[in-house]
Every structure is written in C-alpha cells, then in structure tokens.
Amino acid sequence: MKSTVGKASEGLSVYGMDDSPRGKLLSAAARLFRDQGFDRTTVRDIAREVGLQSGSIFHHFATKEDILQAVMAEVISFNTSRLREAIEGLTCPTEKLKALVRSELRFIVGDTREAMTVLVYEWRCLSKERQQEVLGMRDEYEQIWLEVLTELAAAGRLTTKPFIARRLITGMTSWTNTWFDQAGDLTLDELTDTITQHTCC
C-alpha cells in the first residue's frame, strides 16, 4: 500500500507547514491552540514559542484569527494532496476506501494531529464568513471521499447513501485522537480494517 507521506510532503515539516518563518509560526500556533485553546492563547505566546517579538508576527498576519484560519487552510490543503496520493493507482473501491480511512486516521493521530485537532475543536472561533471560506477548501477533501463511496455504492458494497456513509466515517475517525494509543494493543491498520468493515456490506 502506498504511503500517505509522498510527493506532497517533500520539504515540509511534520505539521504540513513549510520551514519558513511563516511555517514555523503556524506550527507553533497549531500546538498552542491545541494545548491551550484559541481563546487562551495570545499572540505573545506564539511569538515566544518561535523566538520572535510579538510585533514581528504582524508582518505575517494581521490578527490572531488570521493565524487560526491559516492553520486550518494549510492542513486542509496538505492533507487533501496526501489523500489523493493515497488512492493513486488503485482501482478496487474497497481498497480505495481502506486507503482513505488509513490516511485520515494518520492525519488525526499522526503528523498533523495538532492542526487537525484545532480544525475540529476551534472551528467556533472563526467568524461565519471565515468558516465558509474554510468549508470551501474542505469541499475538495470531502469530494474525494464521496467519489470513492459512490463507486462502492455502484459496486453494491454500500447500503446507505454516500453522504451519510461519509458522516458516519467522520464520526468514527474524528474522535480517535481522544482515545487511540499508537503504542497500545490496537494497531492503526486494525482500526482501519474495523472502520472499513463497518462501512462496506
């Protein structure tokens, strides 16, 4: 099975951000927003994390909300590319689904866990307008899932509507960061198989 870390990740940090000052700032912000929450994290906290003066951050972002939106936009773009790579060359709809599930689990509990956690839990901190902008980016990510689930339905391997199946999968994967232990008895591949089996008929 092709690794989800491929061409899209070359030259990028483990958080999906590049190694530029802006990228390092976003990586630090993702960690702090996850650990402290958006509301309790100050611009000074972020600056301290990357060794900058508070005012220097405003050369990159006008507001703290701009930083939050950028963290979300970067991780969506990065993981959308990796999701496409995960199913590249696969023809079996079930194998495609398994590759998507495995990839999403890795995104959530692996190298982009900070930013993915922020995307889920700090969503409310964006204005309605910014939420719509991020949702627009998320549509491309979700479309990959819907196309594969539609293929499964056409092959008689899915008994529910693709949109509903995707919502159910999201429910199974999104909360793994709160309980899944990569050093525990259950492996990521075993969890992938379980979710795939619960989705396919």
Image: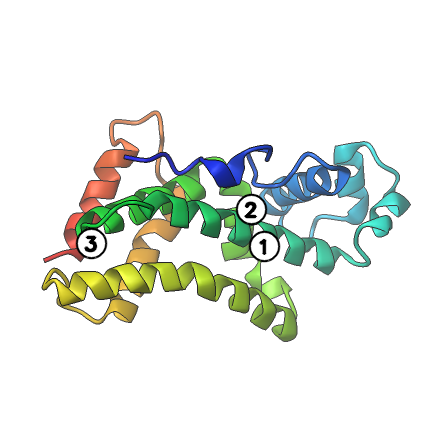
Residue at point 58%, 45% (across, down):
34
How far across and how far down the image is residue 107, in percent? 44, 43
Q: Quadrant of residue 15?
A: top right
In this rendering, position of residue 13 left or right of residue 5: right
Judged by depth in the image, the label closer to the viewer, 1 or 3, is 3
How far across and how far down the image is residue 193, in percent? 19, 42
Examine the rendered structure and indicate whether residue 33 appears above or below residue 150: above
**Amino acid type, callout 2:** Ala
Provide the residue designation for mark 3. Answer: 93
How far across and how far down the image is residue 26, in percent? 68, 44
**Amino acid type, callout 1:** Met
The color scheme shown is rainbow
Provide the residue designation for mark 2. Answer: 115
Q: Quadrant of the C terminus?
A: bottom left
Query: Which mark identifies residue 7?
Result: none
Disc with the residue nearer the chain's start (3 vs 2):
3
Provide the residue designation for mark 1. Answer: 72
Q: Is residue 164 visible?
A: yes
Q: State how many labels appear.
A: 3
Q: Residues within 10 Å of mark 1 (few under 14, many from 20)?
A: many
In this rendering, position of residue 52 left or right of residue 110: right
Residue at point 35%, 25% (across, down):
183
Disc with the residue nearer the chain's start (1 vs 3):
1
